[in-house]
Amino acid sequence: MPQTPSDTARLLADIGGTNARFAWQAAPGAPITDVQVLPGAHYPTLQAAMHAYLDGLGRGAPAAVAIAIANPITGDMVRMTNHDWAFSQSAVKAEFGLRTLRMLNDFTALALALPDLPAAELRQVGGGEAVPGVAMGLVGAGTGLGVSGLLPDGHGGWVPLEGEGGHVTLPATTARERTVMDGLIRRYGHASAERVCCGQGLVDTCAILCEADGVTVQGLDSASAVSEAALKAGHPQALETLNIFCAMLGSVAGNLALTLGARGGVYVGGGIVPRLGAWFDTSPFRERFDNKGRFTRLLQGMPVWVITSAQSPALLGAARALDRHR
């Protein structure tokens, strides 16, 4: 007799600062289906968004839920860094009658998906061949800046990193980058890498550069507006903003590659870089990734891939997290 959906079904979620992506998996190893993107601002709580998705499917409650979320997971209570949702894990589990609730950082989930990403969903930006079975790095800019990676466990598997590397101090190296860094410190008290390498970072960086140059900022109040002004209109400060964004991301990715010894390559995810398309490949990213003094040659050999998947790979990573805890 076949099992009912509630015995095997899984709800998978990738919760960012802007959007919540939900998907259904009928059983472990089954295809990931029914992917929907719900704007977080349209729902007062995570639970409300979950109910909206499940009610729309009409399949009842799943047995297990895995939620990849843009936040550290340090206890029962979760308060998002770049959104106003806050919730108790135990309360969510009780409200939906779940047998299993697995919470993990969204970039930890994305890291778990890396070994399964097809070549067609990756675009290489410099470097040579990856060394199999060794550490891999992961960075990605969107609403925030995610950082993770995979380390070999010595038994043919992988251990994902769970951290908040996007909040390391900004690695400014040029006079203009230090101008941006000083402006961010005045605004926020600490200039983290995320303060530049995210959507709001594009807006803030452009505003700081315009202020330094005595230029009035008009209409550059969103990441998409800054990118469009740079790539389509050639706006000087907007274009410089994109170059600084890519340079800083390259420095952060290179730092991660050195720290992990990521000869298995470094992956770039998030929502911003894929939208830049081929322009990113000629940006300062790779030069800054490689520029590590005596270790430049080592970095030059490490491949970097931009993740171009249409469907969030973190959903697959969330499923892998459930697989690991069965």
Image: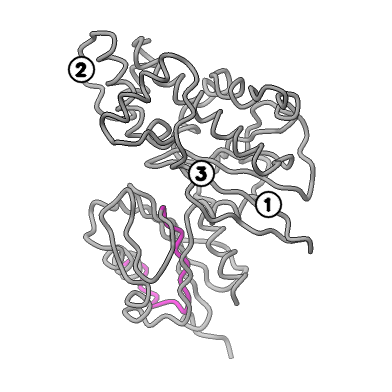
Q: Label 3 to label 1, Cα distance in Å?
A: 17 Å
> By what rule are the colours in the image chosen?
one colour
Could you tell me which secondary element the residue under label 3 belongs to?
Answer: loop
Could you tell me which secondary element the residue under label 1 belongs to?
Answer: helix
In contact (CB < 8 Å): disc 2 and disc 1: no
Quadrant for the N terminus in the image: bottom right
Q: Nearer the viewer, residue 87 or 123?
A: 87
Q: Nearer the viewer, residue 251 or 198?
A: 251
- Tell me if residue 69 is in the magenta stretch: yes
The residue stretch that appears in magenta: 56-70
Chain-order first, disc 3 or disc 1: 1
Disc number placed over residue 323 in the picture, else none: none
x then y, percent, for residue 324: 62, 70
Q: Nearer the viewer, residue 325 or 187?
A: 187
Q: Is residue 215 left or right of residue 57?
A: left
Chain-order first, disc 2 or disc 1: 1
- Tell me if residue 203 is in the magenta stretch: no
Q: Amino acid at mark 2?
A: Gln
Q: Which residue is mark 1?
A: 115
Disc number placed over residue 310 in the picture, else none: 3
* Residue depth check, mark 3 versus mark 2: number of the one nearer the observer: 2
Q: Amino acid at mark 3?
A: Ala
Q: Label 3 to label 2, Cα distance in Å?
A: 33 Å
Q: Residue at x 42, y 21 (%)?
A: 242
